[in-house]
């Protein structure tokens, strides 16, 4: 998969004329892969406290829906009704909607397959001022394509159903959900590199907030199985929703120290305040969601340190990274750490680089909307990349 592609044009201006301050201009365009969403997740456990179906019964009863099932939510409770899992009992006026095994004692499994990536098209410009100060500006047009396929199953693996009617005696349920998210955005990036002495480089950058215009397409399918051998299937309608997400700004500081002609040491510090993220749409201001973002997310301090050693045309590289947790008051949950190794070849007309990046983090995932159905997961990712460059 092509990760990055770009071209830079350089115009030397008065490079050898000491009385002229502006030494050169650079113009470029490119495409960068910002993030790969590829991931596979599997969660399994025996839940003695809650069930997916119990949540559907609570949803139907709390909504005050009458016996007319058209009032039920078509992506959740209505699916359970259409597959004979959610039943209306007029003899129980306070809670007429019921399911078998609402309080758990079921084996639950969730598998998630995620694909897609976020990319960025950019137009950039730079200026060399006195061979001491280098300024840069980029107009960036990021895009997102995200696909998620989830299969959730719930099974009476120990035969604990207490329902006396075999036609409603629950055996298992399978819920398949598909989501595709697409969209585009815009941001601006400003940066500088200052060279106070020949062997030191001090840098800084500012990335503005990015506003994405996103569109979701989603659907669900449910299949139920009962102990009398019957099974039922139902499909939700195809749903779509358009909305906007605004991501936080970033501030970055960096320093690099050259060790003669044999290598260098670099360090980057990045500050991100995740509590400033926002979501909105034409028909909803998402006050509750945005209040939750402010209450639960905080600022993160991200650090990257690297080194390079040169020998002849070869360059050997290594680095470590630490990304702080986005959650307020947390140090480990959602935090990300990693390391990287690389090899570069520098010839007169071309460059060739190989890199390997390993990252890992811990985070929680809910099987469904219930406080008792949460799995603590550890995620790892490995990325190998080859970069080829030509000088003209």
Image: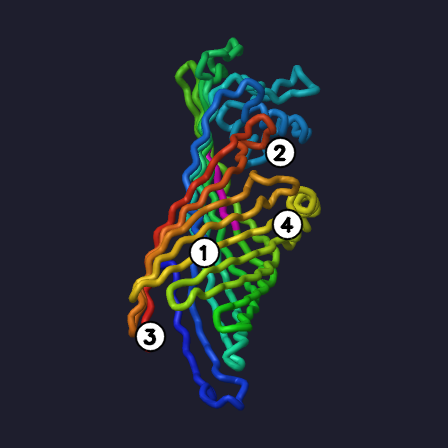
What secondary structure prevails in the magenta region? strand
Nearest to viewer (mark 1 / mark 3): 1
Q: How far across and down, in percent of the image, does residue 285 sit?
A: 68, 51
Q: Nearer the viewer, mark 2 or mark 3?
A: 3
CA gap, disc 4 and disc 3: 41 Å
Rendered view: 253 above or below 129: above
Dot placed on the residue nearer the N-terminal end, 2 or 3? 2
- Label 2 and label 3: CA atoms lie apart by 65 Å
Label 3 crowd bin: few (<14), some (14–19), many (20+), radius 10 Å? few
Q: Position of residue 380 (x, y in %)?
A: 43, 41
Q: Which structural element holds mark 3? A: loop
Q: Earlier in the sequence, mark 2 or mark 4?
A: 2
Q: Give the residue number, with chain letter if any, for mark 1.
A: 306
Residue under pointer 2: 71
If the image is split into quadrants, where does the C terminus sit?
Answer: bottom left
What residue is drawn where x is 58% and y is 44%? Answer: 325
Marks 2 and 4 close (CB-CB < 8 Å): no
């Amino acid at each position: 998969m092509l990760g990055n592609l770009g071209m830079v044009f350089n115009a030397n201006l008065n490079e050898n004329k000491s009385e002229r301050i502006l030494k050169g201009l650079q113009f470029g365009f490119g495409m960068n892969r910002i993030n790969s969403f590829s991931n596979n997740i599997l969660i399994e456990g025996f839940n003695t406290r809650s069930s997916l179906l119990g949540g559907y019964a609570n949803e139907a009863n709390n909504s005050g829906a009458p016996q007319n099932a058209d009032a039920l939510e078509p992506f959740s409770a209505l699916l359970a009704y259409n597959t004979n899992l959610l039943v209306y009992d007029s003899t129980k006026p306070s809670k007429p909607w019921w399911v078998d095994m609402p309080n758990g004692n079921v084996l639950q499994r969730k598998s998630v397959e995620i694909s897609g990536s976020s990319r960025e098209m950019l137009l950039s410009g730079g200026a060399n001022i006195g061979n001491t100060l280098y300024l840069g500006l980029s107009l960036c047009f990021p895009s997102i394509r995200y696909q998620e396929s989830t299969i959730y199953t719930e099974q009476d693996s120990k035969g604990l159903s207490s329902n006396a009617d075999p036609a409603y005696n629950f055996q298992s349920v399978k819920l398949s959900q598909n989501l595709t998210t697409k969209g585009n955005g815009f941001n601006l990036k400003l940066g500088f590199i200052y060279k106070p002495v020949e062997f030191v480089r001090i840098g800084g950058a500012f990335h503005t907030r990015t506003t994405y215009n996103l569109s979701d397409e989603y659907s669900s399918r449910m299949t139920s199985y009962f102990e009398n051998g019957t099974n039922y299937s139902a499909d939700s309608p195809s749903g779509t929703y358009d909305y906007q997400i605004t991501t936080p700004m970033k501030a970055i500081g960096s320093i690099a120290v050259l060790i003669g002609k044999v290598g260098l040491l670099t360090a980057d510090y990045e500050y991100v305040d995740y509590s400033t993220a926002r979501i909105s749409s034409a028909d909803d201001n998402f006050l509750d969601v945005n209040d939750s973002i402010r209450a639960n997310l905080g600022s993160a301090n991200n650090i990257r340190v690297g080194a390079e050693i040169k020998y002849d045309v070869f360059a050997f590289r290594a680095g470590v990274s630490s990304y702080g947790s986005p959650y307020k008051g947390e140090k480990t949950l959602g935090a990300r750490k990693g390391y990287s190794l690389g090899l570069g070849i520098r010839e007169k007309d071309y460059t060739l680089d190989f890199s390997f990046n390993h990252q890992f983090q811990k985070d929680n995932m809910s099987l469904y909307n219930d406080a008792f159905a949460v799995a603590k997961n550890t995620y790892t990712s490995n990325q190998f990349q080859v970069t080829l460059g030509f000088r003209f």
